[in-house]
Amino acid sequence: MNTSTTSSYRHKKVRRTVTVLAAAAVVGVFSAIVADTLKVITEHYEHDFVHRLAENQYLIFFLPFIGFTTIHILRQFLFKNKPNKGIKEVLDSINNGGKTLPAYKIPSHYFNGFLTVIFGGSTGIEVSTVVATASIGALSSHKVGHLNKYRTDLVCAGLAAGVTALFNAPIAGFMFAFEVFTRKRNKTHLAALATAIFTSYILTRYFFYVKVFNFEVTVWHKEALPYFVLLGILAGFNSVFLTKSVLFCKKFFGTLRNDYVKIIAGSLIISTLIFFFPSLYGEGYSGIKNLTSITQPSDLYILLPFVVILFLKPIATSVTLGAGGDGGVFAPSLFIGAFLGLITALTLNYFFHLDLIALNFIIIGMAAVLSGSIHAPLTSIFLVCAIADNYVLFIPIVIASLVSWLVAHFIFPYTVYTYKATV
């Protein structure tokens, strides 16, 4: 009798595990489709609008207003008039027992993220994708009765698959779920993550894969190690500035009770900033690509516009999010890090004749600022290595990312995801 009972229990356990893994595979497929299609159409229309701005730069005074207004109308009449809280709502779903992510979060974040970026909002689609794909995982967990107890596993599987698809970075997808959302280590959880990530990676690799950047990294020199530490320290300060800017603007715009005042004010600020500094438009990846062609200037005054952009990007991102845009700090952190890395390398070369490789500092800066912004150094390390499509800079990236994370955590031990939840 006991043997029979034990056998029956094992059979049920195996069957449930197989069901969870099957659900995770389906989540991985749908998450990849959501992430990849959002990436493709956003890049297409963002480039189209940037091209139109080159023909008539005054269009910028209309585009953000159109984007924010459309998002407001959709939110009010189609998406239950509830604001999108980004990563925080996923954390709430995981940490608060019975609370789940409703199905409307999938189209809500998909379309709002798309509209925010293509109309000039100075952020990216990464957080919109993460929440949408996490919602796919949550939806799958309550479509089959006994899967509800595995909701956290499937939510994490969805968001990990989303990050994997966006950057073709499976290890970064896994680390993001582990560092930011849950530290669960049981076999079912790990297997669900691995299954969703694998299906997402395969689908993306063979049907949607396009390199985000074409970096040609060949070598780094150990003599530059102290300067990588310096870059990490500077990145930590910049990360905190980004975090506090976002928190301040969200609080400030939250005091504006009239939604249209909020939209008009936010649109006007963003339009003005982009009018004078076009690289602040959207996620800013084209601005990062342009940095790779810059050589050592004969006069540091040439770097002044880059310093101004470094300061203005957190403000533009914060206003975008405060005024009702959908997004987060992923793309802005990469953008800020790239500019910080370039400025650091060229300034050190100018004053100390160090012959530092600017491209290396651009890439390392991207990882360092992202690490300090989201307090997830492992995610940042493997994500930027995936972006660079090699591990030549792995050691410098590790050093700068860890230093940035420690500095940022020491100055301000919260991220834009955790601040309101803990204070």
Image (tube, helix red, strand yellow):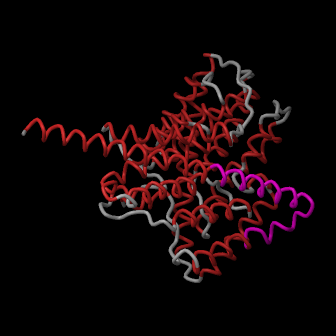
Q: Is residue 367 left or right of residue 51?
A: left
Q: Is residue 149 left or right of residue 250?
A: left
Q: Is residue 79 above or below residue 222?
A: below
Q: Where does the image place residue 379, in percent across and percent down from the top left?
A: 50, 38
Q: Residue at x 7, y 38 (%)?
A: 2
Number of marks in picture: 0
The magenta-colored residue range is 36-65
Q: Residue furthest right?
A: 55
Q: Where does the image place residue 132, in percent across and percent down from the top left?
A: 53, 58
Q: Is residue 285 above or below residue 98?
A: above
Q: Does the segment drawn in magenta span residue 316?
A: no
Q: Residue at x 64, y 35 (%)?
A: 387
Relative depth, front residue between 261 and 384:
384
Relative depth, front residue between 197 and 127:
197
Q: Where does the image place residue 217, in percent across and percent down from the top left?
A: 71, 24
Q: Is residue 375 left or right of residue 165?
A: left
Relative depth, front residue between 420 and 161:
161
Q: Where does the image place residue 375, in percent across and percent down from the top left?
A: 46, 44
Q: Residue furthest left?
A: 1
Q: Does the segment drawn in magenta span residue 45?
A: yes
Quarter the N terminus occupies:
top left
- The image quarter containing residue 298 is top right
Q: Is residue 176 left or right of residue 348?
A: left
Q: Residue at x 43, y 52 (%)?
A: 155
Quarter the C terminus occupies:
bottom left
Q: Residue at x 55, y 47 (%)?
A: 29
